[in-house]
Image: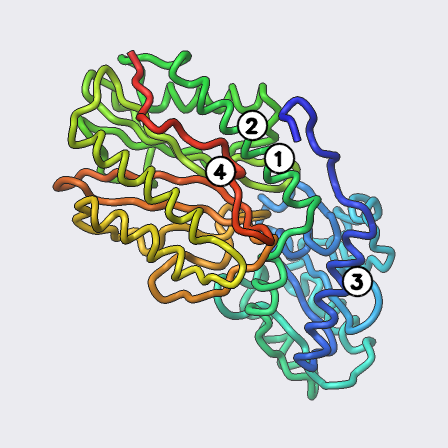
């Protein structure tokens, strides 16, 4: 897929039918009559309902997946016209906001209408999950269901969404290549004497011009010969001779993210910083070589950490060295020393080795990869083997 040819937007109905069938097989195995979903990525995954309106926290939105048949949308009336464009035809609505009963009685009645085989309702309550509804409403839902047990399905959903379809991978590959091209062009656009904020503004504009939909995550850090933080910028700090700057972006195309970073030197690179960059670069290569079906997230972590350790890493307190990627900036699983999740073909992951190479100085490198039947391949265009130098 060339960045000159964007993937088709949206998905076919067959894609949504396949997703629904997959989750319903898991629901049968877990003896769940219906699955309640409340977050934007979950609702979008099964319906295709893509809207910026989720930025408003005022209204709750519900999607029910029955044990058999198509999903049922229980949503505020303001969203009906948009949901009617999806493949879902059972759309129930109420006029919202109504804090006293914001769709809860309608949701309860809809659940009660569904065939009851096991007497269990699934919801995402565990790892890496949230309920996007008031806690008191969820408690009221449980109290009023009358004999229906609410059980956690977070792990089921994490595993289901971790393996991407060909159409999902195509969108992720496209935005990865688009962001790679923007990163590669940056040394010719930026210069010493600009601030972090100015540089990121220029890159955000460049990403949009190249075809990105939005860049909700773009951060930076900088300092003389290295940086001590990777999540807080941009700041108004002016880049000076001898500085190193990291830029990390999560850019979107049609609801799917890339997530990787690049490092830039200003004027010159010290020997110590050059060695650190080479270490994290080789660590990513080791991660790619270790990433294959049947290997675990911990195997990949260990392959990367062995290079960092041999390269003199004083530590890595980020907590992990990569994660899943897709409809969310970070997804399950995590690359850690103890995660041990088996990798499967179709998983999209980040490789993000980082090290403290001097007191208070970090070097972090990140790429995006796809697990294939025979190993793994780059989705982001590989960073330069030598740190780019900005004049």
Q: How far apart are marks 3 and 2 (CA)?
A: 36 Å
Residue 305: % across, % down: 29, 53
Residue 234: % across, % down: 34, 30
Q: Nearer the viewer, mark 4 or mark 3?
A: 4
* Sequence order check, earlier mark of 2 and 4: 2
Residue 166: % across, % down: 69, 46
Residue 253 tag number = 1
* Sequence order check, earlier mark of 1 and 3: 3
Question: What secondary structure is marked by label 4?
Answer: strand
Q: Which residue is drawn at 63% across and 62% down?
A: 160
Question: What secondary structure is marked by label 1?
Answer: strand
Q: Mark 3 points at which residue?
A: 72
Query: In the displayed structure, would residue 27 be above or below residue 51?
Result: below
For the residues bearing labels 2 and 1, Cβ distance under 8 angstroms: yes
* Sequence order check, earlier mark of 2 and 1: 2
How many neighbours does mark 2 have within 10 angstroms: few (below 14), some (14-19), or many (20 or more)? many
Side of 68 where 274 appears, left or right: left
Q: Nearer the viewer, mark 2 or mark 1?
A: 2
Q: Which of marks 2 and 4 is in front?
A: 2
Q: How far apart are marks 1 and 4 (CA)?
A: 10 Å
Q: Which of 113 and 362 is in front in this view?
A: 362
Side of 345 where 166 appears, left or right: right
Q: Name the residue under label 2.
A: 178
Q: Name the residue under label 4.
A: 250
Residue 6 tag number = none
Question: What secondary structure is marked by label 3?
Answer: strand
Q: Residue at x 75, y 34 (%)?
A: 8
Q: Which residue is drawn at 54% across and 34% down?
A: 176
Residue 133: % across, % down: 59, 62
Q: Which coloring applies here? A: rainbow
Q: In which quarter of the image is residue 111?
A: bottom right
């Amino acid at each position: 897929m060339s960045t000159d040819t964007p993937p088709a937007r949206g998905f076919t109905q067959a894609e949504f039918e396949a997703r629904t069938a997959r989750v319903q097989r898991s629901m049968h195995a877990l003896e769940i009559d219906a699955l309640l979903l409340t977050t934007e990525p979950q609702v979008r995954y099964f319906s295709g309902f893509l809207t910026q309106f989720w930025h408003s926290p005022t209204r709750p939105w519900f999607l029910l997946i029955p044990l058999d048949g198509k999903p049922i949308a229980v949503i505020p009336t303001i969203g009906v016209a948009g949901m009617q464009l999806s493949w879902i035809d059972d759309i129930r609505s109420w006029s919202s906001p109504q804090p006293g009963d914001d769709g809860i009685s309608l949701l309860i009645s809809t659940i009660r209408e569904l065939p009851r085989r096991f007497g269990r309702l699934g919801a995402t309550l565990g790892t890496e999950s949230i309920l996007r509804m008031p806690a008191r409403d969820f408690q009221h839902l449980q109290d009023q269901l009358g004999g229906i047990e609410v059980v956690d399905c977070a792990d089921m959903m994490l595993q289901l969404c971790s393996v991407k379809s060909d159409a999902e991978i195509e969108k992720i590959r496209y935005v990865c290549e688009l962001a790679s091209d923007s990163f590669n062009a940056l040394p010719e656009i930026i210069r010493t004497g600009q601030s972090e904020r100015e540089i990121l503004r220029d890159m955000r504009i460049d990403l949009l011009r190249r075809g990105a939909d939005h860049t909700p995550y773009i951060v930076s850090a900088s300092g003389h010969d290295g940086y001590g933080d990777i999540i807080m910028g941009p700041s108004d700090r002016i880049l000076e001779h001898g500085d190193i700057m990291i830029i990390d972006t999560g850019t979107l195309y049609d609801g799917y993210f890339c997530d990787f970073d690049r490092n830039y030197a200003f004027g010159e690179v010290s020997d110590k910083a050059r060695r650190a960059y080479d270490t994290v670069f080789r660590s990513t290569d080791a991660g790619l070589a270790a990433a294959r079906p049947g290997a675990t997230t911990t195997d990949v972590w260990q392959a990367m950490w062995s290079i960092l350790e041999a390269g003199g890493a004083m530590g890595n307190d980020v907590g992990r060295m990569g994660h899943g990627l897709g409809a969310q900036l970070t997804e399950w699983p995590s690359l850690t020393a103890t995660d041990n999740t088996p990798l499967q073909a179709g998983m999209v992951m980040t490789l993000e080795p980082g090290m403290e190479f001097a007191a208070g100085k970090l070097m972090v490198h990140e790429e995006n990869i796809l697990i294939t039947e025979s190993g793994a391949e780059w989705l982001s265009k590989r960073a330069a083997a030598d740190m780019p130098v900005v004049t």
